[in-house]
Amino acid sequence: MHTFDPALRAGQGLSWDRTIDRSLVHRDSIAEVLLTDVIRLADTEFLVAAQWPRSHRVYRPDPIGRHDPMLILESIRQSGLAVSHFAFGVGFDQQSLMRDVSFVLDQRTEPRALLRATNLAITVSCRDVIIRAGQLRGMTIALSFTADDLRFATGAGTIRWISAQSYAALRARGGIRRDWDQLRWGGAVPPRLPSPIRAMADVLITAEPGPGSRRRLVVPLDNPVYFDHPLDHAPGMLLIDAAWQAALDQRADDARLVGCTLDCPAFTELGVDTDILLRPISGDTTEFSVQQDGRVTASGSLRMAS
């Protein structure tokens, strides 16, 4: 049993022996839990252990063993949830909203998954913590990723917590939400051919590009990673991955994602035609926006290295 009591954990190091409870990171599948331990260092400072596998259903290493950078984003997501529940006592009846997320990867010091799984130590600092009526309502986390005593990435994310009743009211105001059983399964149009980073089942954009730099999003509701459990909107992880795939398609190369930002001002609804618009601003940076019926639901930037 993992504990945050500094007196009980004094002198103990991080453990990578087993995962933390899957409910703490909002996963149904134990195989999708990356975190293995959490230690409180101070009121708003934590040390998190994570293990990245040598292989993954979607996030596969490249031919020279470099991990898929999407694992950084998933580790940020899981860290924010776990710290919220464990350290701040957020109940499982509360709903989380990830407002923004970002990371920067240093390829010179990043670990490789050649002979074993990769054990990570992640420092998590909680900033701009909002407490109302004794309940955590929001915070921004800043993260630093280390493997084999080398720092190789930094990240950040802002998470908000609201009651189930407030969440239901918020979703009802959207007006176009569809229930899970009303959604069409699989893409309405076939995806493009597999890319160097994804197999056919995990390609998230259509075969034919739209006008200009527009790409149509394909949402595979049966994907066991992005839809580990039923959701009522497209998750941010899927949106970033789709934008990266679209940017690779536009570049016609196998550039790696080494940094990104994502802001989500609105929900990206399921069952609604969704386009990704790209705007290259330099040789290594592309801005993107996610649009539904002319409305921007998410936007961000991708930094890629050939």
Image (cartoon, rainbow, N blue to C red):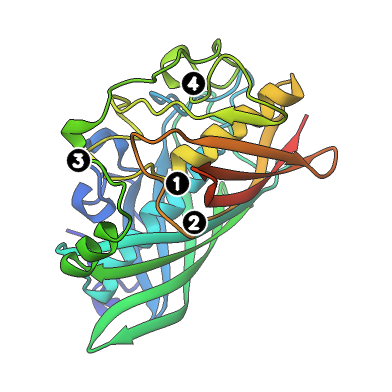
Tell me whether circle 1 and circle 2 mark residues in contact (CB < 8 Å).
Answer: yes
Give whichever of discs 4 and 2 has the lower sequence position.
4
Say above or below: 72 vs 55: below
**On-image quarter of the N terminus:** bottom left
Residue nearest the viewer, comparing 128 with 239: 239
**On-image quarter of the C terminus:** top right
Give how far apart the Cα atoms at labels 1 and 3 are: 19 Å
Amino acid type, mark 4: Val
Q: Is residue 165 left or right of residue 212?
A: left
Q: Is residue 115 left or right of residue 173?
A: right
x%, y% of residue 174? 33, 56
Q: Secondary structure at mark 3?
A: loop
Task: Mark 1 vs mark 3: give the one in front.
Answer: 3
| Dot 1 crowding, Cα within 10 Å, few <14, some 14–19, many 20+ | many
Amino acid type, mark 2: Cys
Q: Which mark is residue 205?
A: none
Amino acid type, mark 3: Asp
Q: Which mark is residue 179?
A: 3
x%, y% of residue 52? 43, 37
x%, y% of residue 105? 66, 47
Q: Secondary structure at mark 4?
A: loop
Give how far apart the Cα atoms at labels 2 and 3 are: 21 Å
Give whichever of discs 1 and 4 has the lower sequence position.
4
Residue placed under numbered mark 1 in the picture: 236
Q: Secondary structure at mark 2?
A: loop
Residue placed under numbered mark 2 in the picture: 264
Residue placed under numbered mark 4 in the picture: 203
Report the residue at 85% width, 37% height from top. Answer: 283
| Dot 2 crowding, Cα within 10 Å, few <14, some 14–19, many 20+ | many
Report the residue at 23% width, 87% height from top. Answer: 134
Q: Can you see residue 178?
A: yes
Task: Mark 2 vs mark 3: give the one in front.
Answer: 3
